[in-house]
Image (tube, rainbow, N blue to C red):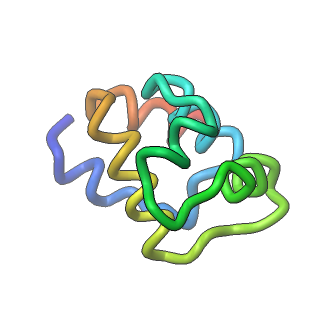
């Protein structure tokens, strides 16, 4: 799978379970994400992963890019498409 296939993923279509799995597979705890990305708090991650609230387009994009930077394209594709 090349990078363009990951670029074709609609971040708004990623399920709460897939967001959680992407975070864990990338090796981040919720608090670690808060440290890595300005403007994202642990509570934002928790709400996203529990389907209580979505994040803005910009925050979703930054979060996805953080996780993607730690995973292979294949890992991202499998987690997003199967969960």
Q: Is residue 35 above or below residue 56?
A: above
Name the residue at 38% across, 27% down. 75
Count of residue discs: 0
Of 20 and 39, the residue lying toward us: 39
Residue found at x 52% / y 67% = 39
Q: Quadrant of the C terminus?
A: top right
Of 38 and 74, nearer the camera is 38
Residue drawn at the location 48% of the way across and 67% of the way down: 59
| Residue 2 left/right relative to 33 | left
- Vertical placement of 52 versus 71: above or below? below
* Position of residue 4 measured from the top left corner of the image (x, y, whole percent): 18, 53
Q: Position of residue 62 (x, y in %)?
A: 39, 60
Of residues 83 and 58, the one nearer the viewer is 58
User: Against 32, is 53 above or below?
Assistant: below
Residue at x-position 45% and y-position 54%: 63
Q: Is residue 61 above or below residue 31?
A: below
Residue 10 rendering spot, x and y as whole percentages:
45, 63
Q: Quadrant of residue 24?
A: top right
Quadrant of the drawing holding the N terminus: top left
Where is residue 76 drawn, in percent x and y?
39, 35
């Amino acid at each position: 799978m090349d990078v363009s296939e990951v670029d074709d993923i609609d971040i708004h279509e990623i399920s709460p379970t897939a967001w959680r799995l992407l975070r864990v597979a990338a090796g981040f705890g919720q608090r670690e994400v808060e440290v890595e990305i300005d403007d994202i708090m642990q509570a934002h991650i928790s709400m996203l992963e529990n389907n209580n609230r979505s994040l803005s387009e910009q925050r979703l994009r930054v979060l996805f890019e953080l996780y993607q930077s730690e995973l292979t394209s294949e890992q991202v594709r499998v987690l997003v498409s199967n969960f």
